[in-house]
Image (tube, rainbow, N blue to C red):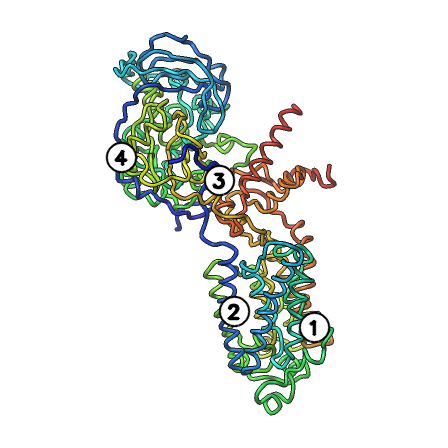
Amino acid sequence: MSDLFNVTSSPHVRGRDDTQRIMLYVIISLLPATVFGIVNFGIKALILVLVTVASAVASEWIYCKIVKKKSTIGDLSAVVTGLLLALNLPSSLPWWVAVIGSAFAIIIVKELYGGLGQNFMNPALGARCFLLISFAGLMTDFSDYPGFADTFGGATPLATIKNGGSVDTMRMILGNIPGTIGETSMIALIIGAIFLILMGVIDLRIPGTYIVTFAVFALIFGGHGFDVQYLISEIAGGGLILGAFFMATDYVTSPITPMGKIVFGICLGILTGIFRIFGAGAEGVSYAIIFSNLLVPLIEKATIPRAFGVKREKSKKGGDGE
Amino acid sequence: MGLRTFKGGIHPYDGKELSKSKPIKELLPEGELVFPLSQHIGAPATPIVSVGDGVLKGQKIADANGFVSSPVFSSVSGTVKAIEPRRTTTGDMVNSIIIESDGNFMEAGFTETEDVTKLSKDEIIGKIRDAGVVGMGGAGFPTHVKLSPKDPDKIDYIIANCAECEPYLTSDYRRMIEQPEKLVEGMKIILLLFPNATGCFGIEDNKPDCIERLTELTKDEPRMKVVPLMTKYPQGGERQLIHAVTGRDINSKMLPADAGCIVDNVETIVAIYNAVKLGKPLTNRIFTVTGDAVSDPRNFYISIGTNYRQLLDAAGGLKTDAKKLVAGGPMMGFALFGLDVPTTKTTSALLCMSKDEASAFEPTACINCGRCVEACPENLIPSRLSDFSKNGQKEEFERWYGLECVECGSCSYGCPARRPLAQAIKTMKKQILADKRKKK
């Protein structure tokens, strides 16, 4: 028995979940959608997922080596970024484009701003938007779906709807539709989302307000009136479910204040509605999320919760640094 | 209807099974006992004995120095050996009276009160003050001050804090199981002071036997009721308890009395009973020695001033190497670097842990997950407050309500990046409060 014992400030016990475990939960929650995507799109999708994840982890490892920082790949956040990026890519994308995307996500969006916890934009979505602009043709080519031409007349469900057509609801819910690798199956994504909610990783504040706000917006401005078929297509036919439950809820780039999460969800819903309904393209989720990411500091400042037992403040003191 | 509770909080491993079934055993101290003159909030007591004096058990050895202060009594008979600074559980050196026990435990005479209902309010408060009763849950606020609010008629709730929400601690539990009558009698005395108040025993639902016993004992007491509470840390925090029992909210600038409440913990109420009914000063308390590194976890009836080493020996010593010793519970207790410190009026446990989780993990980057926000019972954003603390941003810290922190540690407990959030916030709070005192 040594003479001196450890002395630290209280508390002297810690909970079970650490960062690595939370990231592992996120990876597990994405597996149903990943597996479905591979079944849906074939071996090419599997290879693209593996390449994207591996290059994301490698980018982080190499960056840490170059700047002589302790490697942080153990926290699994690079795996999450790589996997999310892969799920946002069309299966026909050449592998080297995916590698560029991973490197951009990890090095430019995440590490250059200080690494995990410091980036102001979701790395996977930042990279996706970068690729969308740089490789527009490759990134929007969804023809790699078995039965693409005959079933859908050569368009994604959202594009079909935008052009006045309609898509079978059941197929969209199950996911037998063209799209990016991970976005097509609403069922698989919802299974993952329920897992995340049960494990206490996310709650419904952001995805719930996001989807509801978007639905209301589409109802009012969509030009279809109260058309259930249209609403379901808008919600299930594109990247909304993947975006709402797995990307918008990204801790680092969403507000930490409980009320801020709700404001954030509303912003997302409105922006997605604007981009989808009034914009040129059929999709809008990715841009809505990265744009709303930029609003987070403002949202947080405006939604500082009043402490327990504190009534409304008498005056605005210290507003301008005293 | 769901169980009463508060928003936020955590569910740590409670460890109470180690010691909860162990009956209270009296432990007679040997050798030297140390009585710090500051075992309470307020001015330190002034010694009224000199080196070489003989003292009896229950004899006053230091007197209160002002209204917000409290006298100190010897818990043994013996000789005053020295009056000098000694290390206490918080790590501070505090001027203390050291008494060598003669092993006889000769008591000073105490006068029992036949009928406490015949005492005037001033007499009751006087007896409590003269017995050195302070809040024994940890804060050590002099009880006679707490019981003297500006307008006693406005107090409508006396809340007995029977939550014992700190993991591992079982002293209040044993008191409620073995001597609930004393608790009820103590409550009766407090109710004499507050004619409009109801006495509520707030007990977490992980102690169904206590809820049952006290419900049984108070069934013919129209002015008392038992309030079962959800088991959640920090349910026994003063503000959280008041909210759960009454639905009223107070903040750092208010006293419970501002919300019509007086809160006292189990041991304190028993001490009030001893003081007013039996005329006995505060010299003993229930104390738990527990933890996975202790051979035989136990609950003791100890003499205040007993050395921690003796308490650990009485529990069979350590069975494995202990990494960390804590005076109090794992959430808010103080880590000890050694055992040569005395028990005081406010210390309720010695926890010996074979693992030190607080230093086992390296803090990593904050991922903004918001678990600290969900856990905070005060509705704060601990991760931001911790950043403000690190960057010395005092105005921002106050604007985000940092001073409302109750230091419960729930944020650090839940942080997946293992960041010492509570520590950073406590540090900044201390600095700001010190600044404010200076300005005055």
Q: Is B272 placed above or below B171 here?
A: above
Tell me the distance, in whole angstroms, between the alpha carbons under discs 1 and 4: 73 Å
| Residue A7 x %, y % | 47, 36
| Residue A117 x %, y % | 61, 55
Give the residue at x 46% y 36%: B238
Badge 4: how crowded within 10 Å, few (<14), some, or many (20+)? some
Q: Are discs 1 and 2 located on one and the same chain?
A: yes
- The residue carrying mark 2 is A30
Horizontally, residue B278 falls left or right of residue B367, namely left
Give the residue at x 63% y 38%: B398
Image depth: mark 2 or mark 4 in front = 2
Q: Looking at the picture, which amino acid does disc 2 mark? A: Leu
Tell me the distance, in whole angstroms, between the alpha carbons under discs 1 and 2: 22 Å
Query: In the image, which disc is placed on residue A169?
Result: none
Among the 4 quarters of the image, the one containing residue B207: top left
Q: Earlier in the sequence, mark 3 or mark 4?
A: 4
Q: Is A174 placed above or below B409 here?
A: below
Q: Looking at the picture, which amino acid does disc 1 mark? A: Leu
- The C terminus of chain B - image quarter: top right
Say which chain tag 2 marks: A
